[in-house]
Image: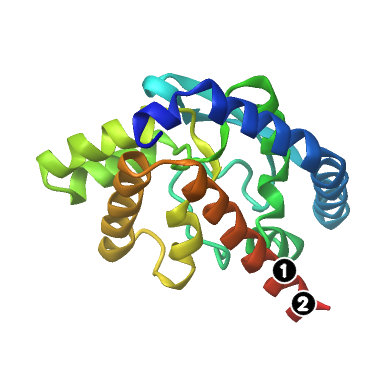
Amino acid sequence: MTGPAWTLSSEKRALDLLIATALSPVYVPTAAVGASLMFLADGRAPVFRQWRIGRDGVPFRLLHVRTMRDGRGMDASRGSDDPRATRPGKVLRKGTFDQFLEVYHVLRGHMAMANPRPLLQFDRRLMREVLPSSVYREWDWASTIGRPGMYSTFGNESIGLEPQSEAFLLRRSECDIEDAHCACLERDLRILGDTAKIGWSFVSRAS
């Protein structure tokens, strides 16, 4: 089973539930620690909800640990070194710990473990401005055909790219389209495995 058939299958949903349930005892306490560090850093609410584009283009409110000084960051992200991020926020972003609360959305059925990421409307406008119309239409389909993912191929590959540059946006379209057409069990497991390696590498360097 590959492509949209896998993306929309009950088997993928069952796998997502299994993995999310197994990770919750680690992810939720880690997110709580991160939120506590943010609160200690500036005394402001450390968790917020933010509208993202979900399955079939339907918006949903994403639960997120705050990493920036200026609140919710409604414009496009500038990556883990975003100058708007607080000191603990930069650590959370580099290790993707700010995303750990998203496991809640996997359990609720808003998200998947591996699929193209849910974007802000602002991000989607940038994609429309940069991509040729035919490519944008295919990317728009690819990025909304299924539940958006906690992790994605592009999320793992984008680390070395200049955030929101043309190369960054073009590579996002390529990865998301490939993820949609080539979706399968093996690809999901590879994305999750690559994400775990990146996270472990960050923790090892920081320790």
Q: Quadrant of the N terminus?
A: top left
Residue 156 shows in the view: yes
Tally of marks: 2
Residue 127 x, y percent position in the rendering: 27, 45
Q: Which residue is mark 2?
A: 204
Q: Which residue is mark 1?
A: 200
Q: Classify residue 5 as left or right of residue 133.
A: right
Q: Amino acid at mark 2?
A: Ser
Identify the residue at image location x=35%, y=36%.
3
**Colouring rule applied to residues:** rainbow
Density class for disc 1 (Cα within 10 Å; few <14, some 14-19, many ≥20) is few
Rendered image: mark on residue 3: none
Q: Nearer the viewer, residue 1 or 157?
A: 1
Residue 132 x, y percent position in the rendering: 11, 47
Q: Secondary structure at mark 1?
A: helix
Q: Nearer the viewer, residue 112 or 185?
A: 185
Q: Classify residue 44 as left or right of residue 12.
A: right
Identify the residue at image location x=81%, y=52%.
34
Q: Cβ–Cβ below 8 Å for labels 1 and 2?
A: yes
Residue 193 x, y percent position in the rendering: 61, 58
